[in-house]
Image (cartoon, rainbow, N blue to C red):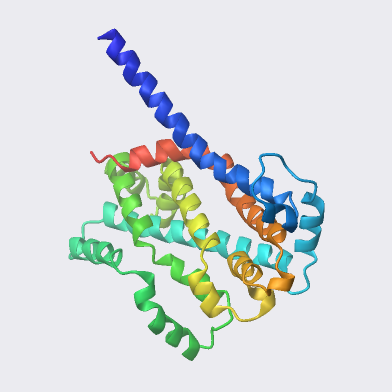
């Protein structure tokens, strides 16, 4: 039995090591190519870094056709605001479903869950028509406010509340005279902080990488986000096309995401595990 157990453990380590290598190898390729010039990249892949990291970074940041700095600021603002709004409103909605016993509660819960089944692309035409009539085209508002309606985040938070938030705590706060918003902001939120961190990461990354809707809404060059700028740089004229700049811009785009993952990684395993278990 001991040998079988050791063999299973060894096989698990081998598989996990292989998967880790496959995941990290592509990031390694990206970083290596960001240090190489366009002619060097055209010759094929190399495991050794090049000497063009500085020139590639300078060329990207000083590209007259691509306002990269404003693109970074725009992406950071939109992703941060969307993540904060999505997580807070979804948690507040989930708290209402969990802590209140009202008529049609199950119907409301089911309706929100059913929205998860509707792809974003299906509603895009009506969404663009609506914001056009409201005069919100070429604005950050349509990219931030709709993030309040996040059924996936809501479902995760309901599951987390059910497994980690006893209603006795809420009742005790009410008996002590705490109003509902004080209870939610100062009692409930500290308890569910791991879940908020996990969903904040996912919401930030989803908004940061979002290309489809921003490309339809944003028209001004100074308001465009990084995914749009990367697509523009990638589709540039052949004579002006520089793969070194493309890889450098993609590298710049993944840095904020990597920093957020490193800062909040301790919440991911605990938050996801607790949120997936009811009872």
Residue 106: name its quadrant: bottom left
Look at the picture and state if 102 lies above or below 40: below
Q: In the displayed structure, does residue 29 sit left or right of residue 268? A: right
Q: Is residue 167 left or right of residue 187?
A: left
**Which residue is more in the foreground, 131 or 224?**
224
User: Is residue 66 shown to the viewer in this render?
Assistant: no
Q: Can you see residue 161?
A: yes
Residue 142: horizontal and vertical position, in percent?
A: 50, 76
Farthest-out residue, front: 43
**Residue 197 at x, y percent in the picture:** 48, 46
Q: Quadrant of the C terminus?
A: top left
Residue lying at the far top of the rendered structure: 2
Q: Is residue 200 left or right of residue 256?
A: left
Q: Quadrant of the N terminus?
A: top left
Splitting the image into 4 quarters, where does residue 168 fall? top left
Q: Look at 61% across and 81% down and name the residue there.
A: 219
Rendering coords of residue 272 (x, y %): 38, 41
Residue 216 lies, in percent from the top left, at: 52, 79
Residue 140 vertical placement versus 206 (above, below) = below
Q: Is residue 145 above or below residue 106?
A: below
């Amino acid at each position: 039995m001991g040998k079988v157990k050791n063999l299973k453990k060894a096989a698990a380590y081998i598989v996990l090591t292989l998967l880790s290598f496959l995941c990290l190898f592509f990031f390694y390729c990206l970083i290596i190519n960001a240090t190489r010039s366009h002619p060097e990249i055209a010759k094929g892949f190399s495991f050794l870094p090049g000497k063009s990291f500085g020139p590639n970074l300078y060329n990207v940041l000083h590209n007259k056709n691509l306002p990269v700095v404003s693109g970074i600021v725009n992406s950071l603002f939109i992703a941060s605001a969307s993540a904060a709004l999505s997580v807070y409103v979804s948690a507040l909605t989930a708290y209402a479903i969990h802590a209140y016993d009202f008529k049609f509660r199950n119907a409301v819960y089911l309706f929100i869950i059913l929205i998860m089944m509707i792809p974003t692309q299906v509603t895009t035409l009506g969404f663009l028509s609506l914001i056009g009539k409201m005069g919100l085209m070429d604005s950050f508002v349509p990219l931030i406010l709709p993030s309040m309606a996040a059924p996936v985040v809501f479902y995760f938070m309901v599951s987390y509340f059910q497994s980690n938030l006893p209603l006795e705590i809420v009742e005790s706060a009410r008996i002590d005279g705490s109003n509902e918003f004080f209870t939610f902001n100062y009692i409930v939120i500290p308890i569910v902080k791991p879940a908020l961190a996990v969903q904040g990461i996912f919401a930030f990354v989803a908004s940061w990488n979002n290309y489809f809707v921003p490309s339809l809404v944003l028209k001004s060059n100074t308001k465009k986000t990084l995914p749009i700028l990367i697509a523009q740089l990638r589709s540039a004229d052949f004579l002006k096309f520089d793969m070194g700049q493309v890889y450098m811009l993609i590298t710049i785009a993944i840095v904020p995401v990597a920093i957020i993952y490193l800062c909040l990684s301790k919440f991911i395993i605990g938050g996801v595990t607790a949120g997936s278990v009811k009872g």
